[in-house]
Structures are given as structure tokens and as C-alpha cells.
Image (spheres, grey):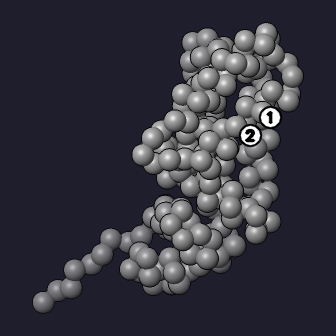
């Protein structure tokens, strides 16, 4: 009788499991042992792909940063400056509903950043990137005040935190804020 072999886990399998565990349980779930249990694997498999837990955490955060940057690119494909601004703001506010598990984990990563320097540095880089992008989009709409970008971004982050799974109000609400800001021109 031959035993059935499970497919080998890839680095991506471990990373996706980490994002899911982070969302469900928090950063304590990001150790080799809890992740191995979650995946029905051995810690040896974890260490085959990652030198240690800090290297794993760094890989998670790098993937999140890369997806955040890709999200800005996709939102910037609209035809007009106003549509690009609206799309970008809506994408930032609606990360909890994003298709990408990395972007759905944003609130959990922000919470993790409160206790972890590496996560805090990654959040700071993403915030800086997004703020600069919003500022460029607002400037293209003749609103050059950096504080407006900060207000819009802070609102988007707040909408992530207030997420109500029964109602997705982030997109219409942030769209209304964009309209209000544009009315100030």
C-alpha cells in the first residue's frame, strides 16, 4: 500500500497562510509552529523556505508593500484625473474587500505595527507612497495642498477600520469626500 503524498508547500503557500492567520489571530500566529499546524506541515518545511521567523515576517511585509504599490498602479489607469483620484481613494478605503489576501490584511498589519518595528516601518513606507500618490493626483486636479491628501488618506484608513461586513459603504463615502474636496477648487 502506498501512502498518498501531499503536494509540497511553496513559499507562497506559507505567505498566504500567514496573511490569513494574521487576520484571524494576530501576529502571535506568525511563528513557525502555529503556521505549520495550520498548514498540516512540519516546521522543517517552514525553515526550508525561510531562514527564521523575522525573515518570514519581512517577506510578508514586502509582499504587502508590493501589492499596495500595484494597487496604486491599477487605480491610476482611469481616463481622467478626477476618475484616477476617485478610483485611488476608493481602492485605499476598500482594502478589506480587496481580492488580494495581502490587501485584506491591511488592518491587521496596521495593528501589528503598533508592537513591531519592522511592521511599523513597512506601514510608514506604504503610507508615504500612498500620500505622495494622492498628492500628485490632487495636484493634477488643481488642489496642491498636501494636507488634503492627508485628510483623504486618513479617511480611507478610518473607513477600513470601520468596515461593516454587512454593508460596503467605503466606496460611496470616500467618493463623497473626493467630491467635497474637488468642490473646493
Residue for point 81% across, 16% down: 143
Which residue corresponds to mark 2?
A: 154
Taking the image as shown, residue 126 lies to the left or right of residue 4, namely right
Q: Quadrant of the N terminus?
A: bottom left
Residue for point 62% across, 54% down: 107
Q: Position of residue 2 (x, y in %)?
A: 17, 86
Name the one closer to the observer, 176 or 93. Answer: 176
Give the Cα distance between marks 1 and 2: 6 Å
Say above or below: 149 vs 65. Answer: above
Residue for point 49% across, 63% down: 20
Which of the 4 quarters of the picture holds residue 9? bottom left
Q: Which residue is the extreme one toward the bottom?
A: 1
How dense is the environment of label 1, judged by Cα within 10 Å: few (below 14), some, or many (20 and up)? some
Residue for point 62% across, 30% down: 174
Q: Position of residue 31 (x, y in %)?
A: 59, 79
Which of the 4 quarters of the picture holds residue 117? bottom right
Q: How many marks?
A: 2
Q: Position of residue 129 (x, y in %)?
A: 76, 39
Q: Position of residue 171 (x, y in %)?
A: 54, 31
**SS for dot 1:** helix
How dense is the environment of label 2, judged by Cα within 10 Å: few (below 14), some, or many (20 and up)? some
Say above or below: 155 vs 140. Answer: below
Circle 1/circle 2 CB separation < 8 Å: yes
- Any part of residue 19 in sight: yes
**SS for dot 2:** helix
Which residue corresponds to mark 1?
A: 150
Say above or below: 95 vs 62. Answer: above
Amino acid at each position: 500500500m502506498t501512502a498518498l503524498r501531499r503536494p509540497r508547500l511553496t513559499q507562497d503557500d506559507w505567505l498566504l497562510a500567514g496573511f490569513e492567520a494574521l487576520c484571524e489571530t494576530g501576529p502571535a500566529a506568525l511563528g513557525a509552529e502555529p503556521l505549520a499546524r495550520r498548514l498540516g506541515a512540519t516546521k522543517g518545511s517552514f525553515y526550508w523556505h525561510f531562514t527564521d521567523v523575522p525573515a518570514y515576517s519581512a517577506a510578508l511585509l514586502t509582499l504587502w508593500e508590493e501589492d499596495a504599490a500595484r494597487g496604486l498602479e491599477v487605480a491610476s489607469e482611469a481616463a481622467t484625473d478626477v476618475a484616477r483620484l476617485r478610483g485611488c481613494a476608493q481602492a485605499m478605503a476598500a482594502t478589506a474587500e480587496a481580492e488580494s489576501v495581502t490587501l485584506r490584511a491591511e488592518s491587521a498589519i496596521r495593528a501589528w505595527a503598533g508592537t513591531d518595528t519592522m511592521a511599523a516601518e513597512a506601514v510608514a513606507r506604504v503610507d508615504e507612497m500612498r500620500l505622495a500618490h494622492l498628492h500628485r493626483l490632487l495636484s493634477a486636479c488643481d488642489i496642491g495642498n498636501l494636507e488634503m491628501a492627508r485628510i483623504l488618506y486618513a479617511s480611507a484608513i478610518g473607513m477600513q477600520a470601520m468596515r461593516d461586513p454587512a454593508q460596503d459603504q467605503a466606496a460611496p463615502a470616500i467618493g463623497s469626500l473626493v467630491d467635497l474636496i474637488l468642490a473646493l477648487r
